[in-house]
Image: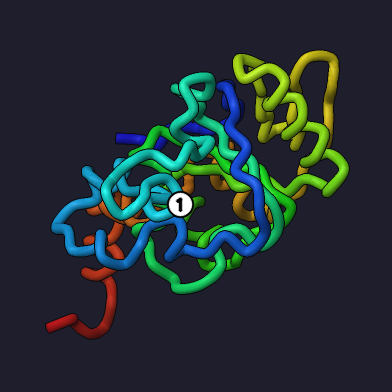
Amino acid sequence: MALAKIKQLRGTGVYVPGDDLDTDRIIPARFMKCVTFDGLGEYAFYDARFDEDGNSKGHPLDAPSHKGASILISGKNFGCGSSREHAPQSLYHFGLRAVLAESFAEIFFGNCTTLGIPCAVLSATDREALAQAVDANPKLEIEIDLEKSEVRFGERKMQFNMPESARAALAGGQWDPLSQLLEAKEQVAAVESALPYRFA
């Protein structure tokens, strides 16, 4: 099955303030004892969202006004820390489909791309303007256009940065190398049969 071409995304946003929000903050290590990633969404930002008794701390992700938001907005160096794939998986299973921030940790960025989660870099001025707009109107529709490298909302339009290889992979439906490899079984077998040696 061909991967989706992620050319445009639309949704509402939620602003999670702060710089250097690391992967342990995104998904605490004690929740990584899982066979599949399916249930990780409920633990995204768990320690920032709940106290020791499981009571809500009023985190933006739990605000009723942001229920159903699919675009996370944050500060600098988002996703730093350990290279755990569980971090982007927890965001995906929470329902988030894109992250807009001032910068990203490299491995987190790559893990997000292979899940089909665009991570787009905004300037500090644009990120602040978007965060203020989302706080003022949580139902504000945000559009991320990967073909034009634009974020649009209301009457505003702003450019984002993303490495060209990632942008082209997402927009062209080539963002998961493993899926591409599995889809090309016949070609892989043909190449293998033509090799002068065999894999054991």
| Image spot of residue 199 (x, y percent) | 18, 81
Report the residue at 68% width, 26% height from top: 135
Bin the neighbour count of mark 1 within 10 Å (Cα to Cα): few under 14, some 14-19, many 20 and up: some
Report the residue at 27% width, 71% height from top: 194
Quadrant where the C terminus sits is bottom left
Local SS, label 1: helix
Left or right? Give the position of 152 relative to 146: right
Q: Using the image, determine if residue 185 lies above or below residue 157.
A: below
Left or right? Give the position of 34 relative to 100: left
| Image spot of residue 57 (x, y percent) | 44, 42
Nearer to the camera, 69 or 37:
69
Q: Using the image, determine if residue 95 lies above or below residue 54.
A: above
Q: Residue at label 1?
A: 48
Q: Using the image, determine if residue 126 lies above or below residue 9.
A: below
Kind of residue at disc 1 = Ala
Report the residue at 58% width, 32% height from top: 14
| Image spot of residue 18 (x, y percent) | 66, 54
